[in-house]
Image (tube, rainbow, N blue to C red):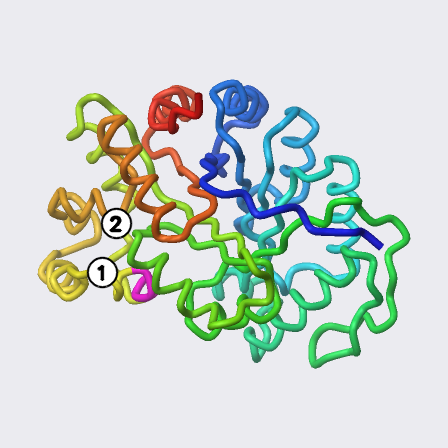
Amino acid sequence: MSESRTPSARRRVGVMLPLDLPVGEVLPYVRRAEELGFDQVWVVEDLGWRGGVAQAATVLAATTNLTVGIGIMPAGARNVCFAAMELATLAQLHPGRLIAGIGHGMPGWMRRAGSWPASPLTLIKEYASALRLLVAGEPGPANGRYVRCEGVVLTEIPDIVPPVVLGVRGPKSQAVAGEVADGLLLAEPAAPAYITNSLRNLGPAPSVNSPEIVVYDAAAVDEDEEAALARVRTVLESVGEPQWAAHIDPLPFAAELRAHRAACPDARHFARTLPADWVRELSIAGTPARARSAIDARHAAGATSVVLAPAGPAPLTALDALARALPDRH
């Protein structure tokens, strides 16, 4: 069996691979991210777009030092034994460069795919527990309500076992992450107050001493701060909707934000008229110095990896601009 998991990375900065990036730009994008000094690239797996495992394999093979995160693989989408085989193979071929995110998946998507369970909490708890054991070379646990892999043992296992983080937002699901996972992945917007609140939900004694806390945020960097804020406003159109309550509730202006949404005729008007201070809190946007300060604030709140999701057109151009917010490590 493998000796240890890869150590938690502290104060890392990554970038998201846009799900709608034209296929011919994928490899130039990730290679440029590595050249610019980003620590990580995160791939997403939304129903109908590109598969997470295939993207991760391609990015790992096309780069040298980047850590690649999959954020997220829905627990109901794959048999846990075969998911473990995929992840173990990637981690074998690219030691220490993989982080696996597991989540519930969006309920509407998962229902359309026929994979939404009666108890999502039970499924993700069983799935994450079994996945971590299998990838580490341990026998599968006793069969549960959803996950059946008792006694299964992988033959090929990695020397460095990749962390398994849960991409979940509800307090009960985050408590499960504290019990059975190596950390959390928080979708955007991940303001510092939301990070702090989510860490509390992990419980007093998480299953690992130094959990990975990966956070996503819409990002735009420009010497013209108003131009940067304008680019992220489009991404923030949905944050006033009820499903984003967990992200908004910990913020000091939560009640005002809800009142603002109720007064707006639609989500577009809501985002366009958000006060600039709220936009700054809900994104990583502005001048390079201001964006760097926003990244630092998320690390100070407990994030181990801050992942920038480029806002606006021309992702390759945006990537170069975002790199100007990277901390000086020399």
Question: Residue at (28%, 28%) from the top-left corner?
Answer: 221
**Residue neighbourhood size for the residue with mark 1, other residues' Cα within 10 Å, grouped as few (<14), some (14–19), many (≥20):** some
134 left or right of 54 in image: right
Q: Is residue 275 above or below residue 314?
A: below
Q: Amino acid at mark 1?
A: Leu
Amino acid type shown at disc 2: Glu
Cα distance, mark 2 to mark 1? 17 Å
Residue at label 2?
237
The number of callouts visible is: 2
Do callouts 2 and 1 mark residues in contact (Cβ within 8 Å)? no
Q: Residue at x 40, y 53 (%)?
A: 302
Callout in the foreground (2, 1):
1
| Residue 157 or residue 143, whichever sits in front | 157
- The vertical placement of 329 against 211, above or below, is above
Q: Position of residue 187 (x, y in %)?
A: 42, 52
Instruction: State the image coordinates of residue 147 (x, y, percent, origin top left).
Output: 73, 72
* Mark earlier in primary sequence (2, 1): 2
User: Residue sitting at 12 percent across and 56 percent down?
Assistant: 264
Alpha-carbon neighbours of circle 2 within 10 Å: few (<14), some, or many (≥20)? some
Left or right: where does residue 143 sit relative to residue 259? right
* Mark 1, residue position: 251
Q: Residue at x 54, y 67 (%)?
A: 206
Residue 303 covered by magenta stretch: no
Quadrant into which the C terminus falls: top left
Residue 116, label in figure: none
**Image location (x, y in percent) of residue 196:** 35, 60
What SS does tag 2 mark? helix
- The magenta-colored residue range is 243-247
